[in-house]
Image (cartoon, coloured by chain):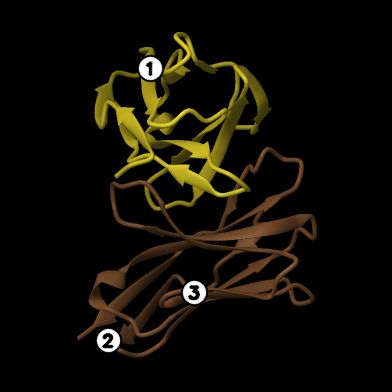
Chain colours: A brown, B yellow
Amino acid sequence: DQQVKQNSPSLSVQEGRISILNCDYTNSMFDYFLWYKKYPAEGPTFLISISSIKDKNEDGRFTVFLNKSAKHLSLHIVPSQPGDSAVYFCAASASGTASKLTFGTGTRLQVTL
Amino acid sequence: EPEVTQTPSHQVTQMGQEVILRCVPISNHLYFYWYRQILGQKVEFLVSFYNNEISEKSEIFDDQFSVERPDGSNFTLKIRSTKLEDSAMYFCARKASGNTIYFGEGSWLTVV
């Protein structure tokens, strides 16, 4: 039951360039979306979120775009830095579900020098 | 600084033994969660806990699992009789304002 999908298991980007991580969802009840960054053996760290009433949210180097009609969201990181190298998970929740999150499978981002 | 503190950070237990994982929220929030991540897989929801009651649970959260907040502060996840497939990283989480959920550092459980 893959309600949230991240089709790219890995991505390699040069330092200073833009990283674009993609996420698709199938459940039309989802109305809140989040991106988390995760290092091995650590908990997910919240990065940025977006509500379904918006199509863009920006926070410093991170911007999340939401295309509701396509059920697609993306995370843009610009400029990418070596410290951004980690696994990135998108997650979604639906109103009335106590904010239970459904996670994607993750994309491993490697930022090279 | 972690939003919640989890103990132990790593526990090795024999199959069939009981395990208790603990979570100490730093701030006083009402909504708490347990999630887990089996090695190489995605993070999965286990249970949400609101106002000292389970508000939602997943199919994974069967009769072997239980949660409680015995002293109004610590939030515990108990696995009564561990199985090999319970080996995973278990994350406690709490909800801030809105729908953003913040995770603890995790407890790595290895069942042998």
B58 in relation to A90, above or below: above
Quadrant of residue B24 within the rendered picture: top left
Image location of residue A36, percent across then percent down:
45, 58
Between circles 2 and 3, the one closer to the viewer is: 2
The chain holding disc 1 is B
Q: Which mark is residue A15?
A: 2
The residue tagged 3 is: A8
Kindly identify the residue that appears in the image at 53 percent across and 43 percent down.
B44
Image location of residue B6, percent across then percent down:
33, 30
Kindly identify the residue that appears in the image at 31 percent across and 47 percent down.
A42
A53 in relation to B76, above or below: below
Q: Secondary structure at mark 3?
A: loop
Q: CA distance from mark 2 to mark 1?
A: 43 Å
Left or right, B55 with respect to B109, comes to right
The chain holding disc 3 is A
Between circles 2 and 1, the one closer to the viewer is: 2
Q: Which mark is residue A24?
A: none
Kindly identify the residue that appears in the image at 48 percent across and 52 percent down.
B42
Q: Residues within 10 Å of mark 1 (few under 14, many from 20)?
A: some
Whichever of labels 2 and 3 marks the residue nearer the N terminus, that label is 3
Amino acid type, mark 2: Glu
Q: Residues within 10 Å of mark 3 (few under 14, many from 20)?
A: some
Q: Are marks 2 and 3 on the same chain?
A: yes
The residue tagged 1 is: B20
Q: CA distance from mark 1 to mark 3?
A: 36 Å
Please report contact status of discs 2 and 3: CB closer than 8 Å, yes or no: no
The chain holding disc 2 is A
Q: Nearer the viewer, residue A54 or A81?
A: A54
Kindly identify the residue that appears in the image at 72 percent across and 40 percent down.
A97
Q: CA distance from mark 2 to mark 3?
A: 19 Å
